[in-house]
Amino acid sequence: MSFATLAELFASAMKKEGEYRAEFYVAIVKSWPVEWVHSFEELCLAAGLLKAQFRISFADAFIAATSIRLDACLVHKNPEFDALKSILTTESLPYKPRR
């Protein structure tokens, strides 16, 4: 799991539920038995390439690049990742409602 995922979780929770809940969710996710991936130049450039090629946010590009590097299935509920189905394995959860 990339730290960009953690940043996305924290930002989303902060907006919707405040700092206390955001920190709570981060603590839960950090307790999961997953491999944490730190950024490094090759991964950052791969994310930049995805950002240039697809209409996705930088954080989503970084998450996708991490998934590709680890040959991992990207489980998500973000329709932005649908554009990447041809280059990585995805599993869609029910999408979040649009505002």
Image (spheres, grey):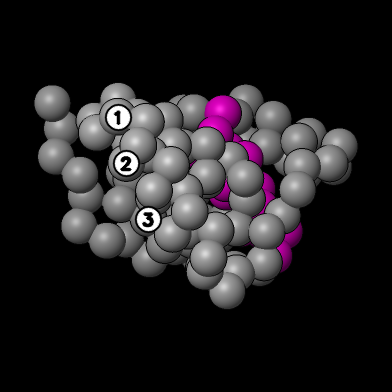
Q: Residues within 10 Å of mark 3 (few under 14, many from 20)?
A: some
Residue found at x 55% / y 58%: 30
Of residue 30 and residue 78, the one placed in the foreground of this image is 30
Residue to which mark 1 is pinned: 18
Residue 74: image x %, image y %? 49, 61
Label located before the other in sequence (1 or 3)? 1
Of residue 29 and residue 46, the one placed in the foreground of this image is 29
Residue to which mark 3 is pinned: 76
Residue 50: image x %, image y %? 62, 36
Residue 61 magenta:
yes
Determine whether label 3 and label 2 are within 8 Å by CB. no
Range of residues picked out in magenta: 58-70
Say above or below: 93 vs 45.
below
The disc at residue 21 is 2
Viewer-side label of 3, 2: 2
Residue 10: image x %, image y %? 44, 37
Provide the major secondary structure of the magenta segment.
Answer: helix
For badge 1, the amino acid type reads Gly
Q: Secondary structure at mark 2?
A: helix
For badge 3, the amino acid type reads His
